Every structure is written in structure tokens, then in C-alpha cells.
């Protein structure tokens, strides 16, 4: 029997079987078309995904379907691109914990899709389609705590990689236009690979005062904090070239004083 979707509310969590049963869609893929319910389910997976979906305030810039090579505006990409005229209702889920699908609600395509370069499953540059979407009936139910916990899990995953692998991931995930989610304050979605690489290269030494980290964290690692030389709020990039590792005292100093001589030292360090 077709559902009117009134019993599924934003914030509810389904497993994969429940999602498929509810919408009558395929159990696989990030874009799942259902002819039975005339819906398109799209999934933004923040745990395991080659796609670089990005929130910019209240807009989700969602990457289309196709894992290898340039994406084409066909199949479900075409369905999403024409969703404002084809009568298909589009529903968004986000994943922060493996196999847990948090329902966000129906979404609407608010601007024309555009092209962008991302890496594919073989880590080769290719052109993808990006779809600017907004929730149509509610605000995002995702809390900043959920985003932070997901980021911490990613850092633990990246910590097991070699410096060479980490550098490759950091370069691939570097952002010039850093995404953010709206909450009580603006929260920038930083690359965990970029942050961890800065700490790895600092090797336990603050890159401003040149002193050892003041203590070790609960994992036994020297405690340093990542700092963007050109602040994200001022348009700075989230990239290895703009990121250093500082002790808590120097980090606070940079955000309160941001002295020209300190800034020059950090810029010189990265240029070399």
C-alpha cells in the first residue's frame, strides 16, 4: 500500500531494510528511485563515501550518481535535475553512524545543477554533477554534537594511516570554499585529514612557540590544536598549506592577538 509519509518524521532513524520497505526502493546506492511510491531517496553518507557532499548554510550541495569517470545527466541524476517538474518527491537521509539512516525530510532543488571536479573511486579527477537542495518542510534535525562525534571517528580512522597516505587524503579533501552547517552558531565542516596531517607533521612541537605540547591526550598523543593561518571566517582555505598545529596557549593567542610577527612566522613556516 502506498504511504503518504506522514508517519515518518524528520529526525527518525531507520535501518536499510526499514528504509527500503517504507519507500519501496532498492537496498543499494546513494540515489534510489521508487516507481511504486513515485519517490527518489537520496543518501548523504558521512561515514563511507567517495562523494563530497557539502552543506553551505541551509543548502546541501549534493553530488550526483556515478563512481568512476565523468558523471552524466542521466538515470537518477536526470530524475533529480527534473524533480521540480516531473512530480517525483525527493527525500533526504544522512548517515553519521554505519547502517543508521537519519531522515531529514523532503528536499527541493533550489538552483540549477552545476559541474565540479572531484575524485572518483579510483582517485582520479573527474567532473561530477552537484545539486543544490534545501529541506522543504523543516530545519535540519542534525545536532552539532552528531557532527563533532562523526569528525572524531574520522580522525581515529585517519590516525592509523601513514603520513604519505594522510597527505594524499588531505590534498584530496582540501577545500577553498569551506562548507558549514547552521546551528546556534556557524559550524565549519573541516577536513579531518587536513587537521591530522598538521598535527602529524608538527611531531608534538607547537609550530609557533617551538615548545613541546603541554600534555598528552587520552590516547597518549601530544595535545596540539589545528589552526588556520588565514581564518576560515575570513575566507581562508581548509588545506595543508593554510593549517598549522599549535599548543592551546598559542592557539588562543592567535585568535585574540593575531600579531603580525606571529602570522609572518607561520606563513614562512608553511612556505618552506
Image: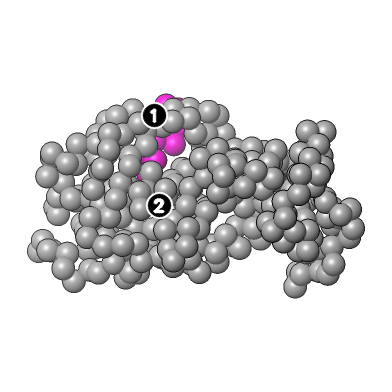
Front position among marks 1 and 2: 2
Rendered residue at 84%/62% (across/down): 213
Q: Position of residue 192 (x, y in %)?
A: 62, 52
What x and y, as percent, mark residue 52?
47, 43
Q: Is mark 1 on a helix, strand or loop?
A: strand
Q: Measure the alpha-carbon separation of dots 1 and 2.
A: 20 Å
Q: Which residue is depicted at the point 43% across and 63% down?
A: 183
Q: Can residue 97 be seen in this view?
A: no
Residue drawn at (33%, 42%), measured in percent from left and top? 132
Give the tally of numbered discs: 2
**Vertical placement of residue 227 versus 149, above or below:** above
**Residue 168, how many percent across, how many down?**
67, 38
Residue 174 falls within the magenta-colored stretch: no
Residue 154: image quadrant is bottom right
Query: Which residue is tagged 1?
Result: 115
The dot on residue 21 is none
Against 221, residue 41 (above or below) is above
Badge 1 or badge 2: first in the primary sequence = 2
- Please state the extent of the stretch shown in magenta in the rendering: 62-71
Q: Which residue is drawn at 57% across and 59% down?
A: 151
Q: Dot 1 surroundings within 10 Å: few (below 14), some, or many (20 or more)?
A: some
> Which element type, helix, strand or loop, lies under badge 2?
strand
When asked about the image quadrant of residue 152, the answer is: bottom right
Would you name the residue on which mark 2 appears?
57
- Is 63 colored magenta in this rendering? yes
**Considering only vertical position in the picture, is 270 above or below 39?**
above
Q: Main secondary structure of the magenta part?
A: loop
Query: Quadrant location of the N terminus?
Result: bottom left
Quadrant hosting residue 84: top left
Amino acid at each position: 500500500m502506498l504511504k503518504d509519509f506522514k508517519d515518518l518524521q524528520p529526525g527518525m532513524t531507520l535501518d536499510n531494510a526499514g528504509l527500503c520497505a517504507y519507500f519501496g526502493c532498492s537496498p543499494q546506492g546513494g540515489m534510489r528511485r521508487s516507481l511504486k511510491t513515485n519517490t527518489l531517496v537520496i543518501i548523504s553518507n558521512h561515514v563511507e563515501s567517495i562523494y563530497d557532499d557539502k552543506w553551505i548554510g541551509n543548502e546541501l550541495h549534493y553530488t550526483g550518481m556515478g563512481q568512476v569517470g565523468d558523471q552524466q545527466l542521466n538515470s537518477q541524476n536526470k530524475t533529480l535535475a527534473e524533480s521540480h517538474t516531473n512530480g517525483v518527491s525527493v527525500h533526504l537521509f544522512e548517515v553519521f553512524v554505519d547502517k543508521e539512516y537519519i531522515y531529514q525530510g523532503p528536499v527541493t532543488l533550489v538552483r540549477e545543477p552545476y559541474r565540479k571536479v572531484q575524485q572518483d573511486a579510483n582517485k582520479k579527477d573527474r567532473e561530477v554533477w552537484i545539486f543544490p537542495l534545501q529541506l522543504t518542510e523543516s530545519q535540519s534535525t542534525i545536532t552539532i554534537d552528531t557532527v563533532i562525534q562523526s569528525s572524531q571517528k574520522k580522525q581515529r580512522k585517519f590516525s592509523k594511516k601513514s603520513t604519505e597516505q594522510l597527505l594524499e587524503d588531505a590534498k584530496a579533501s582540501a577545500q577553498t570554499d569551506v562548507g558549514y552547517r547552521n546551528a546556534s552558531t556557524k559550524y565549519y565542516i573541516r577536513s579531518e585529514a587536513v587537521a591530522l596531517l598538521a598535527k602529524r607533521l608538527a611531531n608534538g612541537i607547537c609550530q609557533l612557540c617551538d615548545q613541546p605540547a603541554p600534555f598528552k591526550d587520552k590516547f597518549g598523543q601530544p595535545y596540539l590544536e589545528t589552526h588556520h593561518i588565514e581564518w576560515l571566517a575570513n575566507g581562508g582555505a581548509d588545506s595543508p598549506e593554510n593549517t598549522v598545529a599549535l599548543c592551546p596557549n598559542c592557539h588562543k593567542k592567535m585568535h585574540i592577538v593575531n600579531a603580525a610577527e606571529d602570522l609572518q612566522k607561520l606563513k614562512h613556516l608553511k612556505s618552506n
